[in-house]
Amino acid sequence: MKIALIGASGFIGSALREEALDRGHQVTALVSHPKKLNATATNLSVKQVDVQNTAQLTEALTGAEVVISSFSGHAQDDIRGYYVQGVKSIIAAVKAADVPRLVIVGGAGSLRVAADTRLIDTPAFPEEYKATALGAQDALALLQAESALNWTMLSPAAEIFPGERTGQFRLGQDDLLVDDQGNSRISVQDYAVALLDEVDHPQHERQRFTLAY
């Protein structure tokens, strides 16, 4: 499958890139700094793209069978605003390039921990992550407002960390998943497994879903 991967050199993007390549997909890595990636891997090409430049992004996405977005605004002063504007550009470019599907990395903050309480609303939610979480929540609302775009968002567990690729985890929808000790955790490697499983065998079209151990 021809995959355009936005943000392919980041923490989650790198895991997605390696998982996609291991499955034999043809990956075009769309990054702002190409020198961060070694493009010698089989089935991998690298393109420099400014996500905020919709026309440039549209050209880079043309011919892809699916777009995976691991775009983030972590390095920006206005994290939330930069991210939301970038997601708007990605949505517009996916539609303009006539790519059949968009699969996007979401956040855990908008997952429910009670009927009327999101994770981001809890006292323990770290202040330094709120702008990112609010941006991901805004992105979900943008996707849900789309009438034609075929999209999927995968929200991770509350804690995502470098670890093992086990292939063993639980899936959910809009509620935060926790284990018997009340922990919500997933390795970035297993996050990549779940997202590429969704790419290979769609089960959550026009939906957000989540996972955890």
Image (cartoon, helix red, strand yellow):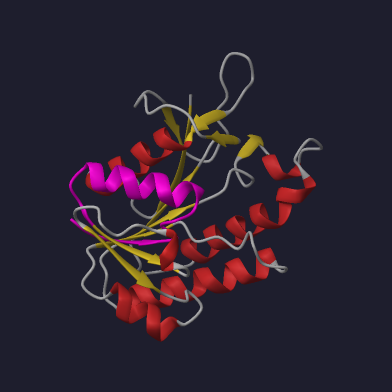
The x, y position of residue 49, in whole percent, is 42, 75
- Specify whether 158 is left or right of 163: right
> Is residue 24 in sight in this rendering?
yes
> Is residue 118 in sight in this rendering?
no
Q: Is residue 209 magenta?
A: no
Q: Residue at x 71, y 44 (%)?
A: 120
The x, y position of residue 44, in whole percent, is 25, 58
Q: Is residue 5 magenta?
A: yes
Q: Which contiguous range is marked in magenta?
A: 1-26
Q: Is residue 151 above or below residue 158?
A: below
Q: Is residue 151 above or below residue 121?
A: below
The x, y position of residue 82, in whole percent, is 62, 71
Number of numbered discs visible in the structure rendering? 0
Which image quarter is the N terminus in?
A: bottom left
Closer to the camera, 14 or 136?
14
Q: Residue at x 32, y 45 (%)?
A: 18
